[in-house]
Amino acid sequence: MSDPAYIVYDRECIFCQNYVSFIRLKDAVGPVELIDARSDDPRVADLVAKGFNLDEGMVFVNRGQVHHGADAVHVLSQLTSPVGMLNRLNGRIFASPALTRALYPAMKLGRRITLMARGRSLLNKRG
């Protein structure tokens, strides 16, 4: 049996929090563990040690494959169940890796602005 899939995301970011709560992955990959990037979970430290900048994007790990930032959003969108309007929209918008990469900087900027507006700091967990 392979290791369970997991997503490392910033729980302080309302966009990140809402995104990981609405995507439906269970049918495609089985249970997916959600890990707060601000936690002391050893997988967070391992990703940072491997050079992943968690301020630059969430990480999705599935079947030994590590997807970061725009790549993670693209892969997640393709594995998400088409049940529900938001999931179908997510699948369509992020179906193209090129479009996902083009949109991702605006998503990161939105995260930074909302963190600042809420008085929260960046993660500053850099590799």
Image: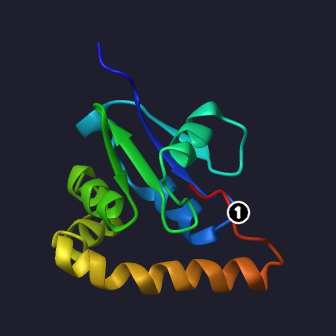
Determine the residue positioned at 29% across, 84% down: 102
Q: Mark 1: which secondary structure?
A: loop
User: Is 71 drawn above or below residue 39 in the view shown?
Assistant: below
User: Is 22 drawn above or below residue 44 in the view shown?
Assistant: below
Q: Quadrant of the N terminus?
A: top left
Q: In this orientation, which residue lies closer to the viewer: 84 or 98?
A: 98
> Residue 28: horizontal and vertical position, in percent?
24, 39
Determine the residue positioned at 37% across, 22% down: 3
Residue 74, quarter of the rendered image? bottom left
Q: Amino acid at mark 1?
A: Glu
Q: In this orientation, which residue lies closer to the viewer: 88 or 20?
A: 20
> Residue 105: horizontal and vertical position, in percent?
42, 83
- Total marks placed: 1
Position of residue 30 in the picture relative to residue 12 (left or right): left
> Residue 45: horizontal and vertical position, in percent?
62, 40
> Residue 24: horizontal and vertical position, in percent?
36, 48
In the displayed image of the protein, which residue is found farthest to the top? 1
Q: Quadrant of the C terminus?
A: bottom right
Determine the residue positioned at 34% across, 68% down: 70
